[in-house]
Image (cartoon, rainbow, N blue to C red):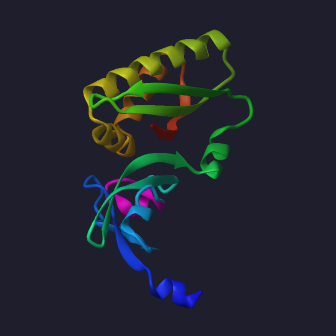
Amino acid sequence: MAKAVIQKNWYEIQAPDIFSVDEVGETPSEKQSQVIGRTVKESLNEMMEETSKYYVDVTLKVTDVEGNKAFTEIDGMECSSEFVSRMIRKRSDRMDLVHDTTTSDGREVRVKVIGATLKKTSSETLKAVRKELSDILDEKASEQSYEEFMENIFLDNVQEDMREAANQIYPFRELEVRKTELKE
């Protein structure tokens, strides 16, 4: 086993430019082509200084290798299950939205939103909120590249606009992007 690891080369995994850290970790491989497609999961709190989202993990996917450096792009993000379970309480409704949208650079992203109302509400009200949030996601994504869109989600800019619109329809205690996935 030790002999096999010694024969492999180590590649530094580089984070995209929007993050404040340069290197995320290292990975061993015999050939450069084997590194492409590998994924790394890191806490957003460790990668961005200006965020306080301790509950978000970012998945990075290796897209290119030059020398001993493996360059990545954001493959998605996800809130921890503990955070989601703490959001939902008795005598309130949970609202889920799964929406596919396309960014200005043609990347297709699946965005999953979760919300918790202050009190119980009707399904028609939640349907109206989902429609409004879908429109906001489409508008924001069409104006920005994929990397800009993800950065705005990390910095809570998209969520602020969604909270404003949702609270005009019905008051929400919490509203958060639970997960994003880059569709191939």
| Residue farthest along the right direction in this orientation | 90
Any magenta on residue 99?
A: no
Q: In terms of depth relative to the viewer, which is nearer, 2 or 167?
A: 2
Quarter of the image that includes the C terminus = top left
Q: Is residue 159 left or right of residue 151?
A: right
Residue 168 in view, yes or no: no
The residue lying at 40 percent from left, 64 percent from top is: 46
Count up the numbered dots.
0
Q: Residue 149: percent from the left, percent from the top?
A: 33, 37
Q: Is residue 102 left or right of residue 181?
A: left
Q: Is 100 left, or right, of 15 in this rendering?
A: right
Q: Residue 16 location in percent, x, y?
A: 30, 55
| Point 48% across, 33% down: residue | 111
Q: Quadrant of residue 135?
A: top left
Residue for point 53% across, 32% down: 113
Q: Is residue 51 magenta?
A: yes
Rendered-image quadrant of the N terminus: bottom right
Q: What's the magenta region?
A: 40-52
Asked whether, in this view, residue 72 is left or right of residue 184, the answer is left
Q: Is residue 29 above or below residue 88?
A: below
Q: Position of residue 161 (x, y in %)?
A: 37, 28
Question: Is 66 in front, or is 48?
Answer: 66
Q: Return the residue nearer the eye: 17 or 10.
A: 10
Please give the name of the residue rendered at 28% of the width and 61% of the height, measured from the top-left corner.
Answer: 20
Q: Position of residue 163 (x, y in %)?
A: 44, 28
Q: In this view of the protein, can residue 17 be seen by the observer?
A: yes
